[in-house]
Each structure stands twice: as C-alpha cells, then as structure tokens.
Image (cartoon, rainbow, N blue to C red):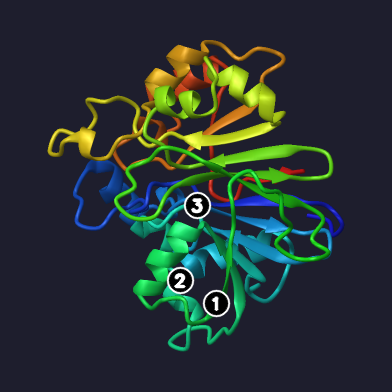
Amino acid sequence: MSRGEIEVVILGTAQDGGIPQAGCSCSNCIAAHTDNNLRRNPVSCGINGIDGSFHLIEAGRNLSEQLKIYSDKIGLENIEIPDTVCLTHIHLGHIDGLGQFGKEVMGMEKIPLFASEKSIKVLQKRNILLPFSVKKIKDRLLFSPSKECGFELEFLKVPHRDEEGDTHAILIHGPKKILLFLPDHDNWTETLRAYNKETIREWFKEMQIDYALIDGTFWSSQELSHRNILEIPHPPISKTIEMLGRKDVNDPEIIFFHLNHTNPVTNIYSKESIFLKSLGWQVAKDGQVFTL
C-alpha cells in the first residue's frame, strides 16, 4: 500500500458476533476454533488517508486483531492507532470495542468520534464516550474526518431495527472512486422506498458508486432453525441476487459482508458461494483492500 492513495482495508466481514460466535457449536464455529483461516472478525474497515492518517469505521470486540491487520496492510512495524472513529449505528457488535480506547487499555483522549445525533445521545447515557470528542453528523452531509485525509464521508440513513439510535450506511468518496459501506438494513423494499428508487441498480447508479459492500448476513430466511429470523431482519443474499440477476458491465463491484456464522457463503467451496461467484458477485475477505 503506497502513501498518497486512499485505501480502504476490510478489517472484518462477519456479523456482530464474529466467527466463531460465542456459545455456538455449529460446524462453522467449531472449525473456526481450530483453523484461523476460517475465522472472521466483526464487520469493520479502516481508511488510509493520503496523509497517512488512519480512520476506523465501526469499533468491535476484535479491535486488537483488526488494528494489526490494518498496520500489516499499510506496511507498518508497529500497531497503528486510529486518528478518528466513525459508527454506522449502536448495535453491540459495532460499538463493543469503544471501551478499549479508554484508560483501561489504550488511554486515548479526545479522539474524534463521528456518529448520528441519536446514536451519540444514547452512547452518552451509557457513559462510554469519555475517550472521545463527539462529532454529530447529519444525513447526506459530506465531511472529511480530518483536514488533510483527502477523502470525504457521507451518512445515508437506512431502515434497521432501531430500538435505540438510528442506522446509516456510509459513502466513502475518494478522489477517483466511491465505496458504499452498508453492513445493516432491514430489507430492500424499505431502503429503496426511502430513496424513491425502484431497483438496487437505480439507487447505486444515482450514488455513482464503484464498490458496494452490502449486507449479506443470511443466505436465506430459513437459515436459523433455533431463532425467529424476523427478530433480526436483514435482506437475504438469495433475495438480493434474485433482484440483481447476473452482473452487468455497467454494475459496480458488489461484495457481500456482515456474514452470520450460519451463512453457507462463509465456505468458499459451498454451492451457494459457487453460484454467487458465477453471477459475478463477491464475498468479502478480512484484509481485502480497495483503492479509491
């Protein structure tokens, strides 16, 4: 990775619990306990600014491993600490690493944290923002997380199980390309309606994105045998690719992430993974890098 380019490093591709998930004895989780190649961190990414600054999106429980992934990818000998933190929403797996910035671990002070006003209000009540200087961000407002980073972020509100706070996707605007970071939303019907769009392609085209990292939590709505999947709504990959069909030459690169431990596409040799790839779509990998 060269200094002077905007690079987005994928630091986690799993749903909030990661893989292996706590308390789970499924074959995927048992295998991941013994094979590090099968492990996946909770969803997150790091952005390398043109000035060498480091900007973290989501702060999950595997922060130690994720900071090492980032530092290795940009060629640093020491572990890099983020200059800023940005949150899409406040469900546990996206924020349970925030405490590690405090005196018990890194001992940081006044690190800028960007989130929606509703999310910040809830987090302040929980008294976990002491290491941070909070920055309330409005929908559809372009902003740079630091002065010389060379890229801009844009929050896009999306419908998603908002018991507290609210939920956003984030557009990362680089000098040459745009990446959509959309780990969570309830379903395509509501999200597209919120932006007055009929199809996924129509929405993506309006945003002029080159890469779309999108919610791929489950493969199908029948995936969880022991829980009511309606309690944790996400658009199944099978439904998304039914809407999309085969990749067209004018489509952005669409990459699924935020994968639940039950999702068969976590196995690159599964029939679901092979079918997804045959249509021209991808599954994200921890450590994957995109240049903007």
Residue drawn at 37 percent across, 52 percent down: 16
Badge 3 element: loop
**How many neighbours does mark 1 have within 10 angstroms: few (below 14), some (14-19), or many (20 or more)?**
some
Q: CA distance from mark 1 to mark 3?
A: 16 Å
- Residue 289 spot, x, y in % from top left: 67, 46
The mark nearer the N terminus, 3 or 2, is 3
- Residue 204 spot, x, y in % from top left: 63, 25
Badge 1 element: strand
Q: CA distance from mark 3 to mark 2?
A: 13 Å
* 276 horizontally vs 261: left or right: right
Q: Return the mark for residue 88.
A: 3
Residue drawn at 69 percent across, 65 percent down: 54
Indicate whether 181 appears above or below 219. Answer: below
Q: CA distance from mark 2 to mark 1?
A: 9 Å
For the image, the number of numbered tags is 3
- Residue 133 spot, x, y in % from top left: 58, 76
Q: Is residue 45 visible?
A: yes
Residue drawn at 54 percent across, 49 percent down: 286
The amino acid at mark 3 is: Thr
Indicate whether 228 appears above or below 39. Answer: above
- Look at mark 2 in the image and give the residue it sits on: 98
Residue sticking out furthest to the left = 226
Screen quadrant of the C terminus:
top right
Q: Is residue 61 visible?
A: no
| Residue closest to the eye, 263 or 242 | 242
Q: Are marks 2 and 1 in contact (CB under 8 Å)?
A: yes
The amino acid at mark 2 is: Leu
- Look at mark 1 in the image and give the residue it sits on: 132
- Residue 227 spot, x, y in % from top left: 15, 39
